[in-house]
Image (cartoon, rainbow, N blue to C red):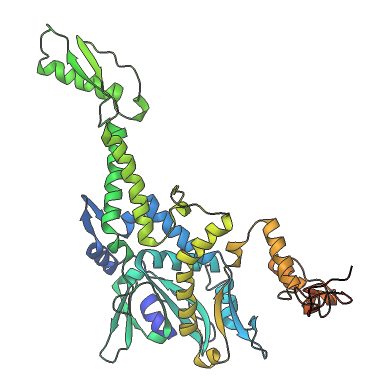
């Protein structure tokens, strides 16, 4: 495979070390795909590049991509008791949690994957193996990869490289993460699906920019005084030039304009169109959030119709409705593409730890940990680990609290009389 990479990417072939891979850049195929996805909506061309200029779209993309990148990603295996333990000796553990290739951290790598998934609903990662061991992971841009399926239902991947070269990559060497898909082998392009809302957002922003740049809505009307002679063409041109010089642009807003002619100024108040423009911007932000399944409050858009009892509940809703579907796609596709069938049968799996997103206040965490220790669900050292504290050397710190302490006595059950009580189960009499 290293020779194959050398052919398309010009990478030197190495027998023991993984071959460096030159990631494809914008090519003719890139441009062709962008043009095919482009569509003039509200007079604005919509494609991936223009979509990134819409603040709501980019905010949603960052919420998803950073949410995918900021949590720990680790490989686990089942021990002899069936409990998951970190598989730190596995080759994927360091790649997914720290450094997948020569130039990216795990955060940067997963953030890039998240951006690809947000905009294209597809992420393509080349799996560079030496023997059967995964050594490096490289993400391709979705525009550079073409996916086809033959009559035998087998997938084929063609990657457009530099200098208009292309190569077929075997399916077993491509880690393909899909978003919602119609045909089952390629995700639906999110920018194309949301093109009308994005195009309208671009047009609305452009209108607002021109409004403040040129004073598109005048603050008033200039008229000649009654009984004065009408302006000739030369005077009109001079008046227009003076008005643009003194009034055009936000730097000249609210300044007093001195007119050389016998003119009267009639002020015009705010119109319903101004309020409608502001309302349209608010609606479009919510519309774009709906496309990407992001809570408006996560992109700093206030939502007065929905309230949460605590910050923890807000992030729980964000995790459940926005991030968890992407976590599941990432984890399941990683298991399917990066782990062997034998490893999966032995209980190996890739997991994203979302606990950090749900950390409440200090008081809430203290109450939760106290309850879990009391119920015998967690040990003190497990609590210390979740709080990023060093383990305790006390042997009791690794022991679960016994059921004897749950109700305050060795064999005491709820609502059961304490030993020595004179209360009888046969009568309602109590000794006086």
Could you tell me which residue is drawn at 75 percent across and 71 percent down? 374
**Which percent across, then down, holds residue 79?**
66, 88
Q: Is residue 199 visible?
A: yes
Q: Nearer the viewer, residue 403 or 64?
A: 403
| Image position of 377 with respect to 221: above or below | below
Q: Quadrant of the N terminus?
A: bottom left
Residue 400 figure quarter: bottom right
Relative placement, left or right, of 303 versus 218 is: right
Q: Is residue 388 visible?
A: no
Q: Nearer the viewer, residue 113 or 83?
A: 83
Q: Quadrant of the C terminus?
A: bottom right
Residue 118 figure quarter: bottom left
Residue 414 figure quarter: bottom right
Q: Nearer the viewer, residue 162 or 42?
A: 42
Could you tell me which residue is drawn at 22 percent across and 22 percent down? 241
**Which percent across, then down, holds residue 78?**
62, 87
Tell me how many marks there are: 0
| Image position of 94 with respect to 242: above or below | below
**Which percent across, then down, holds residue 156?**
32, 84
| Image position of 191 with respect to 279: above or below | below
Relative placement, left or right, of 13 versus 371 is: left
**Which percent across, then down, holds residue 407?**
78, 73
């Amino acid at each position: 495979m290293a020779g194959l990479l050398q052919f398309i990417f010009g990478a030197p072939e190495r027998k023991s070390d993984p071959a460096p891979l030159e990631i494809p850049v914008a090519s003719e195929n890139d441009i062709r795909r962008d043009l095919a996805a482009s569509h003039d909506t509200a007079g604005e061309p919509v494609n991936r590049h223009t979509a990134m200029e819409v603040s709501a779209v980019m905010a949603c993309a960052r919420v998803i991509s950073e949410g995918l990148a900021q949590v720990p990603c680790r490989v686990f295996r089942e021990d002899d008791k069936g409990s998951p333990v970190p598989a730190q000796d596995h080759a994927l553990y360091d790649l997914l949690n720290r450094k997948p290739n020569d130039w990216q951290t795990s955060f940067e790598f997963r953030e890039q994957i998240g951006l690809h998934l947000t905009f294209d609903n597809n992420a393509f990662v080349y799996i560079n193996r030496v023997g059967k061991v995964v050594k490096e992971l490289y993400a391709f841009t979705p525009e550079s990869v073409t996916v086809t399926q033959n009559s035998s239902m087998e997938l084929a991947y063609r990657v457009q490289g530099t200098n208009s070269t292309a190569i077929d990559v075997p399916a077993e060497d491509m880690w393909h993460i899909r978003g919602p898909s119609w045909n089952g082998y390629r995700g639906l392009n999110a920018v194309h699906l949301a093109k009308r809302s994005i195009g309208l957002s671009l047009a609305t922003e452009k209108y607002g920019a021109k409004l403040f740049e040129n004073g598109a809505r005048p603050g008033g009307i200039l008229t000649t005084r009654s009984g004065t002679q009408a302006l000739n063409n030369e005077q009109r041109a001079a008046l227009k030039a003076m008005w643009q010089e003194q009034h055009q642009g936000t730097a000249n807003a609210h300044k007093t304009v001195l007119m050389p002619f016998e003119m009267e100024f009639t002020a015009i108040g705010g119109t319903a169109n101004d309020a409608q423009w502001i309302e349209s911007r608010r609606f479009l932000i919510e519309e774009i959030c709906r496309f990407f399944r992001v809570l408006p409050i996560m992109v700093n858009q206030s939502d007065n119709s929905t309230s949460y009892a605590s910050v923890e509940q807000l992030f729980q809703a964000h995790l459940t409705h926005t991030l968890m579907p992407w976590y599941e796609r990432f984890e399941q596709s990683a298991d399917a593409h990066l782990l062997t069938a034998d490893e999966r049968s032995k209980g190996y799996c890739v997991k994203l730890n979302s606990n950090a997103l749900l950390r409440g206040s200090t008081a809430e965490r203290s109450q939760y940990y106290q309850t879990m220790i009391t119920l015998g669900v967690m040990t003190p050292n497990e609590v210390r680990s979740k709080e990023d504290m060093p383990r305790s050397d006390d042997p009791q710190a690794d022991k679960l609290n016994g059921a004897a302490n749950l109700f305050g006595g060795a064999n005491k059950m709820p609502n059961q009389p304490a030993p020595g009580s004179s209360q009888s189960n046969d009568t309602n009499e109590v000794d006086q």
